[in-house]
Amino acid sequence: DIQMTQSPSSLSASIGDRVTITCRASQSISSYLNWYQQKPGKAPKLLIYAASYLQSGVPSRFSGSGSGTDFSLTISSLQPEDFATYYCQQSYSSPYTFGQGTDLDTK
Amino acid sequence: QVQLVQSGAEVKKPGSSVKVSCKASGGTFGSYSISWVRQAPGQGLEWMGVIIPMYGTPNYAQKFQGRVTIIADKSTSTAYMELSSLRSEDTAVYYCARDVSDLSSNWFDPWGQGTLVTVSS
């Protein structure tokens, strides 16, 4: 199975901050990498697919980059509604695996 | 616009089985796959398997092989996930999600609201 490792596991930031979360795959996954946001008690929500494509309706402050084994999710200017947990997920091969999550909270 | 609505919370005894439903509306059921993902309390996300309703062919994560059955009923636009031989570690929220394929890749969008399954004696 492909292991996905996110860093950091938790992150404290302030409104307006630029925030970057990284995700590393245990082997090359080309651009088969997706990012999700999850708020407490809610289902995950797709933010970025195929490493860098912004899902329709997602604010443009979110962006994704990377290929191969190293990927990142960036929030250019943190807003109050962005405090949540973020997961990366590889779709290169089954079983489709997720990172352990990054908890983003307010500083 | 596809929406997925799941069945309600369940409480099950160890050793029993649970069957969770996921009813789709909008879009054309059968033209997309449905994946199942679970999340234990306070834990991350774990993919369990996927079904392509058009073909009825499931693909399961090795971890759940032999215990999970995923089916799709095109007549009611509903997918089902049944997990057997339940143990306490199966206590989790179970999600269905549309498995979108494009750009030679795939991703999960949207997700159902989740179904809490509690396994307790």
Image: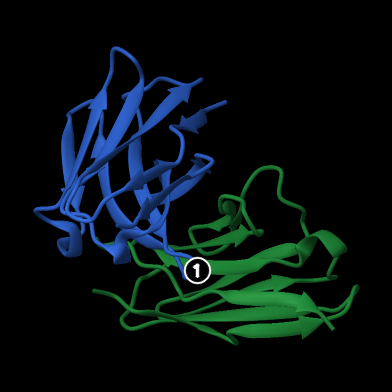
Q: Colour of chain B?
A: blue
Return the chain for callout 1.
Answer: A
Work out whether B79 lies above or below B121: above
Amino acid type at image mark 1: Cys
Report helix, strand or loop for mark 1. Answer: strand
Quadrant of the image for the N terminus of chain B? Answer: top right
User: What residue do we see at 50% from left, 43% from top?
Assistant: B111
Judge the density around disc 1: few (<14), some (14-19), many (≥20) Cα neighbours within 10 Å.
Answer: many
> Residue B45 location in percent, x, y?
43, 63
Quadrant of the image for the C terminus of chain B? Answer: bottom left
**Which residue occupies the foreground of this view, B54 or B93?**
B93
Q: Residue furthest right?
A: A16
Q: Which residue is mark 1?
A: A88
The chain coloured green in the image: A
> Residue B38 location in percent, x, y?
39, 56
**Which residue occupies the foreground of this view, B97 or B107?**
B97
User: What residue do we see at 28% from left, 18% from top?
Assistant: B74
**Quadrant in the rendering for residue A68:** bottom left
User: What residue do we see at 77% from left, 56% from top?
Assistant: A60
